[in-house]
């Protein structure tokens, strides 16, 4: 398998090559960093500051889901789903 491949398996699983995996993790780390910087770009006294903080918080939450999903196989999928969808899809069905 080439390091840049993405292989989808018939059992529903997928395999990421190491290069693709690292690029995806790096993107998640960068999103996390941008989410940390974003609120500081709007002064506290501006009405939009709370909106920007909310958006930054959501970006941070999603980046953490990506990091956990790509690097921590002990993180339950139901937890990741709750973070993304508000409820675990397996619980909602």
Image (cartoon, grey):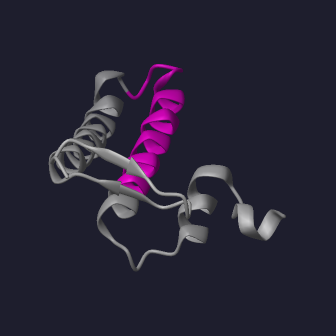
Work out whether 24 lies above or below 74. Answer: above
Quarter the C terminus occupies: bottom right
In the image, taking residue 41 as reference, residue 23 lies left or right, namely: left
Residue 1 is situated, as x and y percent measured from the top left of the image, at 20, 52
| 41 relative to 10, above or below | above
| Residue projecting furthest to the bottom | 74
Taking the image as shown, residue 77 lies to the left or right of residue 64, namely right
Residue span colored magenta: 44-66
Residue 64 drawn in magenta:
yes
Question: Which of the 4 quarters of the picture holds residue 31?
Answer: top left
Q: Nearer the viewer, residue 50 or 60?
A: 60
Residue 90 as seen in the image, left or right of residue 30: right
Identify the main secondary structure in magenta: helix
Q: Which residue is at the front of the view, 53 or 11?
A: 11
Q: What residue is rendered at 57% in x and 57% in y? A: 83
- Residue depicted at 66% across the width and 51% down the height: 85
Residue 89 falls in which quadrant of the image?
A: bottom right
Residue, x 81% and y 63% (percent of image)?
92
| Residue 49 lies in the magenta-colored region | yes
Considering every residue shown, the one lying at the far right of the view is 93
Q: Position of residue 57 (x, y in %)?
A: 45, 44
- Count the marks: 0
> Which one is nearer the viewer's eye here, 34 or 41?
34
């Amino acid at each position: 398998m080439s390091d840049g491949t993405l292989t989808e398996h018939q059992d529903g699983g997928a395999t990421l090559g190491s290069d693709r995996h690292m690029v995806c993790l790096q993107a998640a780390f960068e999103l996390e960093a941008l989410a940390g910087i974003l609120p500081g770009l709007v002064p506290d006294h501006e009405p939009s500051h709370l909106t920007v903080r909310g958006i930054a918080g959501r970006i941070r939450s999603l980046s953490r889901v990506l990091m956990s999903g790509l690097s921590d196989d002990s993180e339950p999928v139901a937890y990741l789903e709750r973070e993304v969808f508000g409820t675990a899809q397996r619980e909602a069905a």
